[in-house]
Image (cartoon, rainbow, N blue to C red):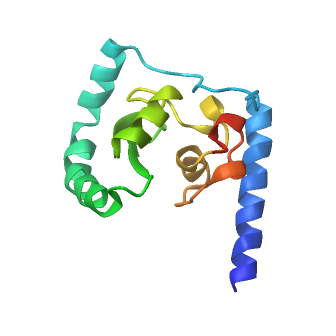
Amino acid sequence: MEQKSRNSLKKIIQASHERSENYGVTKNRVYPGKILNNKELQKRLLSNKALIDIANPILLELHEFLVESGFFIVLTDHEGCILKTLGDKKTIQEAQSLNMVNGAYMDEKSIGTNAMGTALSENMPIQITSKEHFISAYHR
């Protein structure tokens, strides 16, 4: 059963890499292709207020669980726009150095294969790690 699951994941990642290439994303891209300005971000946050309010207690609980783990939590809307991030200071700073900030789009068209964009494309939860990401900057 585990082998079947790994093969399914490989097929999903391969399909995502093909989509990323078709979208024109290059492996040497570092930043998302679309990032909202402050005015657009405020409008997006307001239009997603209900989602943020409902998710916030869950995000805080997850954050407590993940403290000092090197992971961080990202809430996006249905288009992959980052609405909120939580995590250890160092991890958040690393993400910010790649412009993974509120208002950045993490869909496959903007940044290639990644957990948020691929989850949206495949309509399922997924974890993408290291070299499974399409762009090299996310291989760490």
**Picture coordinates of residue 64, whole percent (x, y):** 26, 59
In the picture, measured across the screen, residue 17 lies left or right of residue 82, that is right
Q: Residue at x 60, y 23 (%)?
A: 33
Q: Nearer the viewer, residue 85 or 137?
A: 137
Rendering quarter of residue 36:
top left
Q: Which quadrant is the N terminus positioned in? A: bottom right
Q: Does any portion of residue 99 appear in the rendered image?
A: no
How many numbered discs sit on the rendered protein? 0
| Above/below status of 18 relative to 44 | below
**Picture coordinates of residue 88, whole percent (x, y):** 35, 46
Rendering quarter of residue 28:
top right
Q: Residue at x 30, y 59 (%)?
A: 62
**Picture coordinates of residue 11, whole percent (x, y):** 77, 61
**Picture coordinates of residue 31, whole percent (x, y):** 59, 25
Q: Does any portion of residue 5 appear in the rendered image?
A: yes
Q: Which quadrant is the C terminus positioned in? A: top right
Q: Residue at x 23, y 54 (%)?
A: 60
Rendering quarter of residue 29:
top right
In the picture, measured across the screen, residue 77 lies left or right of residue 60, that is right
Which residue is the extreme one toward the bottom?
A: 1
